Amino acid sequence: MAGEKQVQRKDRRIVIENVRRMLLQEYLMKQTRRAGFGGLDIQRTPMGTRVTLIAERPGLVIGRKGGAIKALTEAVERQFNFDNPQIEVQEVTTPALNAQIMAEKLANALERGWHFRRAGHSTVRRIMEAGAKGCLIVIAGKLTGQRHRRAKFKDGHIKYCGEPRNTWMRKGFAVAKLKPGVIGVTVQIMDPDAKLPDEIEITPPTPESIAAAVAAREEAAAAVAQAALAGPPAAAPAPEVPMGEEDEDPMIDLPSEDKPVELVKTGKVAGKRLKKVLKKAQELEGEADTGVDAKEETK
């Protein structure tokens, strides 16, 4: 019982920690929406909790003389009970390859009045021009009428399941609030550096490997030439035969007369042909006998 209680307490702590991190992510996403929230990384260190905030425009997060980031750090420590939080802001190098930033931009375009097909196709084209291997955008909600529907826009290579999806697919989600209702926007981008299992790269040979191959070929040619100069291999000596046995005939196993002759059954056609052959043989033997008798009478 004590072990089960300990496991339950550990699982409960893990669930509570993950819920707190998700709440922190939603809070920071809401506070830094104008700066282009691109992701969050939370790491626990001996000095405290290090929160790395990825943003498109880090200047808006830091504020003038660091005032905005100080207020944000105090709010995180007060509301989420993190030990000595340290917020670091990191700039996104290519915003078009960040799924969360592109989802926020697409949601903002829908809120400004863009048609969902135009916004979806333009977002896909922008992502693919940035160098992504694949892109999938799903817009779900009341798009054209009172019924809920879903529109998908995709291009390139996309993984839906398996280890490649968990490793190389980046996912972002945003919400667009319109008059008919709320529209959800999901953006999935495959990393340009993704290495799939079916991709094989053949490296060119190095000078060292080429030299080793040439040396091995020369050694094989030299061995063949040396074998040719040595001549054919000597034949094996014949076995010695004892004296007095050279002229003797070899022993041959002849069939014994005591063995009964086996009769073979034949068909009607084969029996008729056999009778004809025997009849012709008897006639030939008779002609031969009469020829011998005629020669004796002439003499």
Image (cartoon, rainbow, N blue to C red):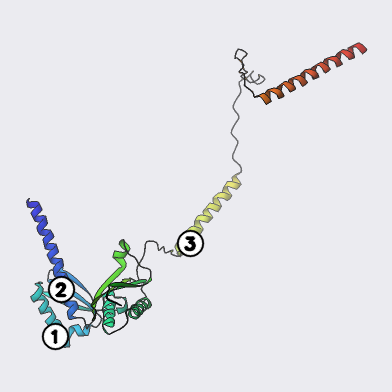
* Between 67 and 204, the one nearer to me in the picture: 67
Res 282 visible: yes
Res 137 visible: no
Q: Position of residue 178 (x, y in %)?
A: 24, 81
Badge 2 local density, few (<14 within 10 Å), some, or many (20+)? some
Q: Position of residue 10 (x, y in %)?
A: 11, 59
Instruction: Give the left or right position of residue 174, taking residue 195 as reference.
Output: left
Residue that numbered label 1 is attached to = 67
Look at the numbered discs 3 and 1 and tell me whether their residues touch, using CB distance below 8 Å. no
* Between 252 and 175, the one nearer to me in the picture: 175
Examine the rendered structure and indicate whether residue 279 appears above or below residue 238: above
Q: Residue at x 27, y 71 (%)?
A: 171
Examine the rendered structure and indicate whether residue 83 appears above or below residue 229: below
Q: Quadrant of residue 127?
A: bottom left
Q: Secondary structure at mark 1?
A: helix
The numbered mark at residue 210 is: 3
How many angstroms separate mark 3 from mark 2 (CA)? 58 Å
Mark 1 vs 2, N-terminal side: 2
Examine the rendered structure and indicate whether residue 65 appears above or below residue 75: below
Q: Secondary structure at mark 3?
A: helix
The tally of labels here is 3
Amino acid under label 2?
Leu
* Between 210 and 260, the one nearer to me in the picture: 260
In the rendered image, the residue lying farthest to the front is 146
Amino acid under label 3?
Ile
Q: Secondary structure at mark 2?
A: helix
Badge 3 local density, few (<14 within 10 Å), some, or many (20+)? few
Instruction: Give the left or right position of residue 48, taking residue 295 as reference.
Output: left
How many angstroms separate mark 1 from mark 2 (CA)? 20 Å
Q: Residue at x 45, y 61 (%)?
A: 209
